[in-house]
Image (cartoon, helix red, strand yellow):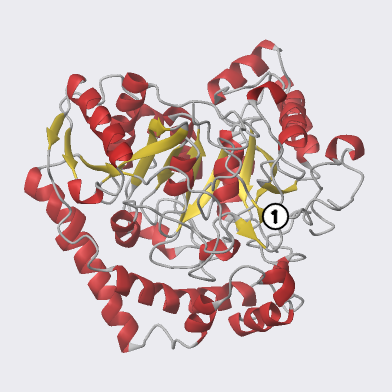
């Protein structure tokens, strides 16, 4: 951990002046049994499941100040996150968080309110640059002391909106693009994040820490990033609403990259309303990210205007049954959700199978290898001459030198494959990119929507959380993130139910720039079903 990130366990003692280390926490023997936690061991929390609107109402009424809200979340993190057998979702706290909260309180007292995020604590993923005393490391020890020269646009928009940047969350190292045998939620710098519903279960990745932290009520809302599944999967595993926007709706400038064609940041929240509020803040054209300029003259939207109790009435939703079948229990949850939608007036086109499912997995990976090498080399070069690493080759060499710390469980074969690739002018890259575009968009989502005149496509986001396994890596059972990810189109996931107490998410995805329509459908389903349940921090799945 960098000296610039305020360690979580000591924050409340040291305030904003002290710096210490989380001695011993990262050295917890991962094979040791977890403590037998239960809901009885968790103290009642004053801000449990509170919404952005609830916080604003409380701060306006004088029930809380932004400083007190921030302190309450820090106390919660101190109790439940840092230490052996705890959630381990926050990789570093912001030493300036209380000062930011004080500033927001002063502005509120002076009658200056910046909007719905004023004074609201937010956690962001540790691949998002902040030009402050926090580092940005992507979870890697190679960048443990790396300081950004400027805020990512996402971070700046949060600051401008009055949010309190509480800290940064752990992630699957390098956004899960280092090895095919990785354990989601593990990083060399942060260790293993655990699922707050059952601590021996995985939160999914790569926005693992954000998902676990928001679910555990360590902040009001959080920001994750996705290339393929990294917002929607942890949202599903952790009982959250996650929005993966159209590529270009939210700037990627200042975010450690994987893919120029698939990367995006997006909100992770406990309600559709809070996710819509956060997405409204994050969006916008940015001269630092050419993808945002594709949006052209499209107006900046207030996504809260899509929140309608009748959002399902008359909506045509296609059921992509070829993403079902990997789990009978998940199928039951999905079928119950479909019945709810029918009762609410939705027109279910069932089946509406995705026509090109599985046909572009190979080309997607090929594109990502080329784009990662190009993007990471550009990002590292932008950190300046004093940066700890300058190229992907430097990262590979560092990992080899620090193999005991950086690669105790899985290797870096994806890094090595990417390093072998040529420039983005290479014919193989251009061919793979064209295949992705054709099969995911024109012959995929666009074709399916046009054929059935759909407002959205429905599929299970994934299965319930698997047991974390550092020997064999992740145990994904199934999911539906790839079409929208490869197309660069939007997807919204939200809780649909649970299997043995583990959350299961349902996804709605559709054409480019259809966020408002998807949010309207998701809100209608959320209000009709009310499936979000707070975690109980159990050691294991309760079988009775």
Q: Residue at x 90, y 36 (%)?
A: 13
Q: Nearer the viewer, residue 316 or 464?
A: 464
Residue 520 visible in the picture: yes
Report the number of numbered marks.
1
- Name above or below for residue 252 compared with residue 343: below
Along the line of sight, the residue nearer the viewer: 277 or 84: 84
Please provide percent x and percent y for residue 88: 68, 46
Which residue is the site of mark 1? 30
* Residue at image coords 57%, 76%: 412
User: Badge 1: how crowded within 10 Å, few (<14), some, or many (20+)?
Assistant: few
Residue 218 x/y as whole percent: 65, 34
Residue 256 sits in quarter = bottom right
Residue at horizontal 70 percent and vertical 54 percent from the top: 30
| Residue at position x 60%, y 15% in the image | 57
In-image side of 384 versus 214 (left or right)? right
Name the element at disc 1: loop
> Which quarter of the image is occupied by the N terminus?
bottom right
Determine whether 494 is above or below 31 in the image. above
User: What percent of the width, then of the height, locates residue 399?
Assistant: 67, 77
Judge whether residue 128 can be spotted in this image. no
Could you tell whether 281 is left or right of 327 in the image?
Answer: right
Outermost residue, left side: 451
Residue furthest out toward the front: 544
**Percent coordinates x, y for residue 151 in the rendering:** 65, 56
| Foreground residue among 56 and 504 | 504
């Amino acid at each position: 951990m960098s000296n610039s990130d305020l360690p979580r366990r000591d924050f409340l003692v040291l305030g904003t002046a002290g710096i210490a280390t989380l001695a011993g926490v990262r050295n917890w023997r991962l094979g040791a049994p977890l403590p037998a936690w239960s809901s009885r061991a968790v103290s009642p929390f004053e801000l449990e499941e509170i919404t952005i609107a609830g916080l604003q109402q409380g701060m306006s009424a004088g029930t809380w100040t932004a400083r007190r809200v921030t302190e309450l979340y820090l106390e919660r993190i101190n109790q439940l996150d840092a230490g052996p057998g705890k959630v381990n979702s926050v990789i570093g706290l912001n030493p300036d968080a209380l000062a930011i909260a004080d500033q927001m309180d002063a502005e509120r007292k002076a009658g200056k309110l910046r909007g719905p995020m004023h004074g609201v604590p937010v956690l962001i993923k540790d691949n998002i640059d902040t030009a402050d005393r926090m580092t940005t490391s992507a979870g890697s020890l190679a960048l443990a002391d790396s300081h950004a020269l400027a805020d990512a646009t996402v971070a700046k928009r949060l600051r401008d909106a009055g949010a309190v940047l509480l800290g940064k969350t752990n992630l699957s190292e390098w956004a899960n693009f280092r090895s095919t045998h990785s354990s989601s939620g593990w990083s060399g710098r942060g260790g293993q994040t655990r699922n707050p519903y059952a601590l021996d279960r995985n939160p999914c990745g790569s926005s693992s820490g954000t998902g676990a932290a928001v679910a555990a009520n360590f902040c009001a809302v959080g920001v994750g990033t996705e290339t393929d599944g990294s917002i929607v999967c942890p949202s599903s595993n952790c009982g959250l609403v996650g929005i993966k926007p159209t590529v270009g709706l939210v700037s990627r400038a200042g975010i450690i990259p994987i893919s120029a064609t698939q990367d995006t940041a997006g909100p992770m929240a406990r309600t559709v309303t809070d996710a819509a509020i956060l997405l409204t803040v994050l969006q916008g054209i940015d001269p630092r990210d050419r993808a945002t300029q594709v949006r052209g003259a499209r107006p900046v939207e207030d996504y809260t205007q899509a929140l309608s109790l009748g959002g399902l009435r008359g909506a045509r939703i296609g059921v992509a049954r070829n993403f079902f079948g990997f789990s009978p229990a998940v199928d039951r949850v999905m079928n119950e959700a479909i019945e709810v939608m029918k009762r609410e007036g939705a027109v279910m086109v069932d089946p509406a199978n995705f026509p090109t499912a599985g046909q572009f997995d190979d080309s997607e990976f090929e594109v990502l290898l080329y784009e990662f090498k190009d993007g990471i080399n550009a990002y590292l070069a932008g950190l300046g001459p004093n940066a700890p690493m300058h190229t992907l080759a430097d990262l590979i060499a560092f990992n080899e030198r620090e193999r005991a710390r950086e690669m105790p469980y899985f290797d870096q074969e994806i890094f090595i494959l990417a390093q072998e690739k040529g420039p983005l002018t290479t014919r193989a890259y251009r061919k793979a990119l064209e295949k992705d575009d054709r099969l995911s968009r024109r012959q995929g989502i666009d074709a399916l929507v046009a054929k059935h005149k759909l407002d959205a496509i429905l599929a299970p986001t994934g299965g319930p959380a698997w047991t974390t396994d550092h020997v064999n890596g992740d145990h994904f059972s199934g999911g539906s993130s790839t079409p929208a990810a490869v197309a660069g189109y939007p997807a919204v996931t939200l809780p649909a139910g649970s299997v043995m107490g583990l959350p299961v998410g349902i996804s709605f995805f559709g054409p480019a720039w259809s966020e408002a329509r998807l949010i309207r459908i998701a809100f209608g389903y959320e209000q009709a079903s009310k499936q979000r349940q707070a975690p109980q921090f159990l050691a294991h799945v309760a079988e009775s």
